[in-house]
Image: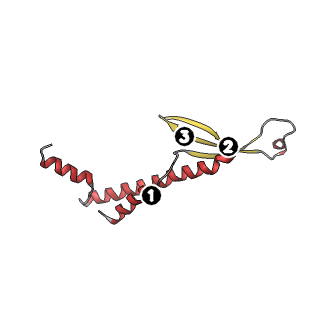
Amino acid sequence: MDNKKETLLTLIKQLTGDLMKGSLAHTAVTCGKKNCRCQRGEKHKTAYFSYRVQGKQKVIHVSHKMIQEVERLTGNWQKLKDIIEKLTAENARLVTKGKLSGNSNNESKNNQSKGK
């Protein structure tokens, strides 16, 4: 197996734990209460997580205590996405050289020789 490909596959295996695909947005809002500090310009900080389920966008509020965890999970998704894109590029390079190797290629040859 190609060293670069092997490295990328190892990175995928090492990326363990939870992840979330979506975007975390930070914003500041006013609440509407007359005597609140936000009416004097010190707005309330809040965060929302936006994601898609079966093509439909969903948005949820993220409490202050959960922001770090959501950032970690979305960061894990981004890392995985970056590795997959690099792996795809490496596999495409190997295909053009006729050197793509892996179990699926060997299984295909075995199935052909068995008449499957």
The residue positioned 29% from the left and 59% from the top of the image is 94
Identify residue for label 1. 14
Left or right of residue 58: residue 32 = right
Query: Which one is closest to the eye, mark 3 or mark 2?
Result: 2
Q: Nearer the viewer, residue 14 or 41?
A: 14
What residue occupies the far right of the structure in this picture?
A: 35
Q: Amino acid at mark 2?
A: Ser
Q: Nearer the viewer, residue 89 or 8?
A: 8
Quadrant of the frame with the N terminus? bottom left
Q: Nearer the viewer, residue 45 or 19?
A: 19
Left or right of residue 53: residue 108 = left
Please rate how many residues cluster around mark 3, counting C-alpha atoms within 10 Å: few if below 14, some from 14 to 19, many from 20: some
> Residue 81, image x and y in percent?
46, 52
Q: Earlier in the sequence, mark 1 or mark 2?
A: 1
> Residue 13, image x and y in percent?
41, 56
The residue positioned 41% from the left and 54% from the top of the image is 85
Mark 1 element type: helix
Query: Which one is closest to the eye, mark 1 or mark 2?
Result: 1
Please rate how many residues cluster around mark 1, counting C-alpha atoms within 10 Å: few if below 14, some from 14 to 19, many from 20: few
Eyeballing the image, is 4 above or below 13? Answer: below
Distance in Å between CA atoms under marks 3 and 1: 25 Å
Residue 63: mark: 2
Q: Nearer the viewer, residue 53 or 39?
A: 53
What residue occupies the far front of the structure in this picture?
A: 17
The residue positioned 26% from the left and 51% from the top of the image is 104
> Residue 8, image x and y in percent?
39, 60
Identify residue for label 3. 51
Eyeballing the image, is 110 above or below 33? Answer: below
Residue 72: mark: none
